[in-house]
Amino acid sequence: MNREIKLINIKEEILSENKGLADKIRERFEKKKVFYLNIMGSPGSGKTSLIMKTIEALGGRYRMAVIEADIDSLVDSEKVAALGVSTVQIHTGGFCHVDANMVEKAIESLPIDELDLVILENVGNLVCPAESDTGAFKNVAILSVPEGDDKPLKYPLMFSLADVLVINKLDYLHMSDFSTQRVMKRVKALNGGIHFFPLSCETSDGLAPWISWLEHEISSIRA
Ligand SMILES: Nc1nc2c(ncn2[C@@H]2O[C@H](COP(=O)(O)OP(=O)(O)OP(=O)(O)O)[C@@H](O)[C@H]2O)c(=O)[nH]1
Ligand SMILES: [Mg+2]
């Protein structure tokens, strides 16, 4: 009797296939000199609000498109499209993150040759989106004050791989025991190279450094 057990590691296979496709997407955006950004964070942390503030602040200086990803609904894509920006909605149908295959399908409907910037709003979740490469050049995590400053300890992966952490809803600070310094210290321990942008999408305080960073990244890819 053959007692040998064959182990098939599905997760590793799926992740490595996804990485191959994500690399192809990155190459494609690089060739076209389009900066492509992935925004991840909990439901309600302010991803759509940040995208909308960013569209307003860039004030038509760049040709933009947004890929919205949700399990269902057109709620966010309708808000973004109302600002006059090309928008594609992905319905993940229950999946809690966006993978490279979904992005490839979404970009088929985008006029890539006529764009400078593509922003992907990932599904609201602090866990799954961090596991799947979307082909983006930079990954932005967003954590909002009402969520609590312990989240980097509980959900370290997203904070470990993000290039940027936006700390949103600073206008709630006075009602909370949240400490921006504590979050930064906890995240730096995981990821020394990360950039921090504490801000409020409600009041627009702190928005300018985020916009400058983004403009710098858009020009770097063009150079
Ligand atoms: N007070 C305050 N409210 C904010 C701020 N940013 C966003 N909000 C509010 O928070 C709620 C959720 O914001 P969204 O931008 O929809 O959050 P999201 O991360 O896109 O949520 P999902 O797409 O559902 O995952 C909305 O009611 C926003 O108006 C902020 O800086 N301060
Ligand atoms: Mg949203």
Image (cartoon, rainbow, N blue to C red):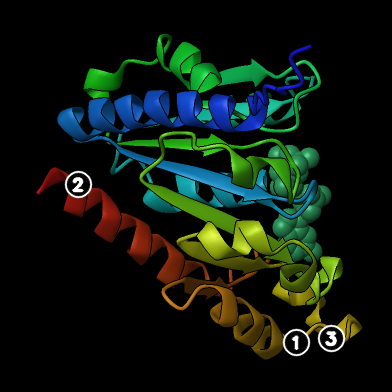
Mark 2 closeness class: few <14, some 14–19, many ≥20 residues within 10 Å = some
Image side of residue 54 versus residue 216, left or right: right
Identify the disc placed on residue 165. Answer: none
Mark 3 = which residue?
174
Q: Is residue 107 visible?
A: yes
Distance Cα–Cα, label 1 vs label 3:
10 Å
Q: Disc 1, disc 2: CB below 8 Å?
A: no
- Compared to residue 97, the image places residue 145 above or below, namely below
Q: Residue sitting at 66 percent across and 82 percent down?
A: 186
Of pointers 3 and 2, the one earlier in the residue sequence: 3
SS at badge 3: helix
- Identity of the amino acid at label 1? Ser
* Nearer to us in this view, 75 or 159: 159
- Viewer-nearest residue: 72 or 138: 138
Q: Nearer the viewer, mark 3 or mark 2?
A: 2
Q: Residue at x 62, y 87 (%)?
A: 185
Q: Position of residue 151 (x, y in %)?
A: 78, 68
Query: What quarter of the picture does the N terminus occupy?
Result: top right
Asked if 17 appears above or below 63 in the picture, the reply is above
Please report contact status of discs 3 and 2: CB closer than 8 Å, yes or no.
Answer: no
Q: Earlier in the sequence, mark 1 or mark 3?
A: 3
Q: What is the CA distance from the residue labelled 3 to the residue labelled 2?
A: 39 Å
Q: Residue at x 40, y 9 (%)?
A: 108
Residue type indicated by callout 3 = His
The local secondary structure at tag 1 comes to loop
Distance Cα–Cα, label 1 vs label 2: 34 Å
Q: Which residue is mark 1?
A: 179
Q: Going 46% across and 71% down the picture, which residue do you hit?
A: 194
Q: Position of residue 197 (x, y in %)?
A: 52, 72
Q: Is the Cβ of the residue at disc 1 closer than 8 Å to that at disc 3?
A: no
User: Pointer 2: what residue?
Assistant: 221
